Image (cartoon, rainbow, N blue to C red):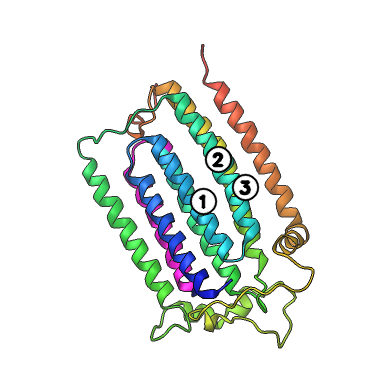
């Protein structure tokens, strides 16, 4: 079976790729997608630990409940984030983060 | 399922997820990014299935790949976003992003490789392992004498999943969700409601025409 460390390395790599995208990209929509990647990476670690802490082959479900909460919060976050992006597009005629340099419109 | 096949499938799906995650970062067109993200989330759902979290895998497919991604694609098409062109000085951000992410990945991976119980490593997690019982008492009715993976054995292979008669992943998850975390899920529903109301009000307030 796959050891816990490989799940954790997978989750760390997924999180780092998302972080690098959030730093590198200028398109706010893609930055939002990279945030989703980071949340998914955290979810992988939660699932792996729920599996590793289990008793007699039954996982500990507290971690999976937490992962479920993360998914629900991600859904709310995307709804608000996309509304903000639409508002930003209306105000600036673009979704580049470099266009957000002044507070006045 | 054969454990060897399960392990091979994990590596295949993890590799696919990482490659499509790289696609999200590298591709220029936002629609390609969104489709790459869909592939990444589907591969991650497959990893969840392999780890025995069937309900979470299905929730991942329905919530992320179904709802969130369709929403993002709608917005991409509504805003008519163009391909991202490299701007002057953007290489600085590329270097910065790669360095920060590389350092973070290296730190986390080395911590994961030196988990307590792994061969020849000592890391701060050992300190955690000694106090793990006080930090997180297992809530699945842990009694003395039951076989449990102690934090000192985290470096080894994970035990195979073996459900008792009449129990499944979904029923156990539901029991935990609606007993210990009942209040939390009510609060969470209010957060979702607030998110929906906030999205509507933000989307309306800036409309001037």
The CA distance from mark 2 to mark 1 is 13 Å
Residue under circle 3?
A: A72
Within the image, what quadrant is residue B76 found in? top left
The image shows residue B32 at horizontal and vertical percentages of 39, 38
Q: Which mark is residue B42?
A: 1
* Mark 2 Cα shell of 10 Å, populated few (<14), some (14-19), many (≥20): many
Height in image: B133 above or below B174? Answer: below
Q: Residue shown at 48%/84% (left/top)?
A: B117
Q: Is residue B145 left or right of residue B90?
A: right
- For this orientation, the residue located farthest to the bottom is B145
Mark 2 or mark 1: name the one nearer the start of the chain: 1
Which chain contains the residue that carries disc 2?
B
Quadrant in the picture for the N terminus of chain B: bottom right
- At x 20%, y 36%, the residue is B88
Q: Is residue B190 visible?
A: yes
The location of residue B135, given as percent across then percent down, is 61, 74
Q: Are circles 3 and 1 on residues that touch, CB within 8 Å?
A: no
Where residue B68 is drawn, which disc sits there?
2
The answer to whether A16 is drawn above or below residue B72 in the figure is below
Say if mark 3 contacts mark 2, CB within 8 Å: no
Q: Position of B81 compared to B125: left or right? A: left
Q: Secondary structure at mark 2?
A: helix
* Residue interval drawn in magenta: A4-29
Of circles 3 and 2, the one toward us is 2
Circles 2, 1 touching at the beta carbon (< 8 Å)? no
Query: In the image, residue B56 lies at what x, y percent?
Result: 62, 56
Q: Is residue A28 visible?
A: no
């Amino acid at each position: 079976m796959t050891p816990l460390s490989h799940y954790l390395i997978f989750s760390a790599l997924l999180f780092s790729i998302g972080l690098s995208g959030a730093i590198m990209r200028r398109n706010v929509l893609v930055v939002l997608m990279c945030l989703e990647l980071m949340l998914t990476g955290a979810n992988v670690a939660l699932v792996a630990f729920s599996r590793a802490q289990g008793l007699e082959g039954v996982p500990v479900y507290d971690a999976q409940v937490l992962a479920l909460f993360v998914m629900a919060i991600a859904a709310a976050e995307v709804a608000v984030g996309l509304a903000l992006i639409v508002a930003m597009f209306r105000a600036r005629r673009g979704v580049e983060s470099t266009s957000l340099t002044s507070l006045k419109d | 399922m054969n454990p060897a096949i399960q392990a091979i499938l994990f590596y295949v799906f993890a590799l696919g997820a990482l490659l499509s995650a790289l696609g999200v970062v590298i591709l220029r067109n936002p629609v390609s990014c969104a489709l790459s993200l869909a592939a990444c989330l589907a591969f991650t759902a497959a990893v969840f299935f392999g780890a025995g979290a069937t309900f979470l895998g299905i929730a991942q497919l329905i919530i992320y790949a179904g709802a969130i991604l369709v929403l993002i694609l709608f917005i991409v098409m509504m805003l008519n976003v163009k391909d991202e062109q490299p701007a002057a000085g953007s290489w600085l951000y590329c270097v910065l992003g790669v360095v920060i992410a590389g350092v973070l990945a290296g730190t986390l991976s080395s911590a994961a490789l030196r988990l307590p119980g792994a061969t020849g490593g000592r890391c701060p997690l050992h300190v955690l392992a000694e106090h793990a019982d006080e930090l997180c008492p297992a809530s699945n009715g842990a009694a003395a004498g039951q076989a449990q993976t102690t934090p000192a054995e985290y470096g080894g292979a994970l035990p195979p999943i073996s459900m008792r008669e009449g129990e499944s992943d979904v029923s156990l998850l539901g029991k935990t969700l609606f007993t210990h975390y009942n209040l939390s899920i009510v609060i969470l529903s209010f957060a979702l409601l607030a998110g929906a109301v906030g999205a509507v009000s933000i989307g309306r307030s800036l409309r001037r025409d």
